[in-house]
Amino acid sequence: MKKYRQVTMLFTIVGLMACNLANKQSKNPAQDKFASFPAYFSQQHDQLRKGDFTLFKTVTLNGQKDTVTISGRDSAAVYDVLKPFMEIDLNKPSLREEYDTSSLYDPFSGRKSVIYKSRGKQTSPSEITMELDRQGNIQQVSVHSYTSNLVYEFRQDLFYQQNRQVRMTTYQKIAFLSPKELEINVTIAPKTGM
């Protein structure tokens, strides 16, 4: 009876060790195939909030313009400006094989352009272009999205230049309704002046 307990205890320990080893191996996710835009733009959000920046935002909706000045410390306002970029996640399992990657390298400046282009017609976004500096840090991002069918058309162009500018242009047309055009330009400047 005593040996039975010892053997049972030994098998239980070996079983627990095997389960623990299997869990450790499965927790190491595969390397992301694409740049992590949610992480990058969350970092930019924090940098703009902590830095001494002022955002000058101009919104034009169907020809009517409105301008507002935003403090970089206003977390909700900065988040709203960067939100369309934060929502782009090409590393989602459903999108992992939907994009081709190409790059261009400038040997003189050391800068690199990386282009993610959709393989399908209706994958959104359809193209992303990143400009990287010598160290591989993202300096600017351009995103183009396009969706169209018999009753709906949607185009969107997003542009982000680190600590300088955000630009968003959106066109939306639904059958039997007048189209809507929205343009948002945000200039990011240090509080001490541009």
Image: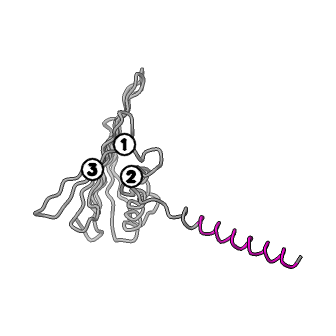
Residue 6 is covered by the magenta coloring? yes
Residue on which disc 1 sits: 125
Mark 3 in CB contact with mark 2 (< 8 angstroms):
no
Name the foreground residue: 137 vs 75.
Answer: 137
Residue 156 in view here: no
Q: Please name which of the two marks, 3 or 2, marks the residue nearer to the observer.
A: 3
Q: Separation of disc 3 and disc 1 at Cα? A: 11 Å
Badge 1 or badge 2: first in the primary sequence: 2
Badge 3 or badge 2: first in the primary sequence: 2
In percent of width and height, residue 4 lies at 84, 74
Please give the count of numbered marks on the rendered protein.
3
Report the span colored magenta.
2-23
Q: Main secondary structure of the magenta part?
A: helix
Residue on which disc 3 sits: 129
Q: Quadrant of residue 47?
A: bottom left
Name the foreground residue: 184 vs 89.
Answer: 89
Q: Separation of disc 1 and disc 2 at Cα? A: 11 Å
* Circle on res. 85: 2
Q: Amino acid at mark 3?
A: Thr
Relative vertical location of residue 35 with respect to residue 175 in this rendering, above or below? below
Q: Secondary structure at mark 3?
A: strand
At x 41%, y 67%, the residue is 46
Q: Separation of disc 3 and disc 2 at Cα? A: 13 Å
Q: Amino acid at mark 1?
A: Pro
At x 41%, y 27%, the residue is 152
Mark 1 in CB contact with mark 2 (< 8 angstroms):
no
Q: Residues within 10 Å of mark 1 (few under 14, many from 20)?
A: many
Q: In which quadrant of the rendered image does the N terminus lie? A: bottom right
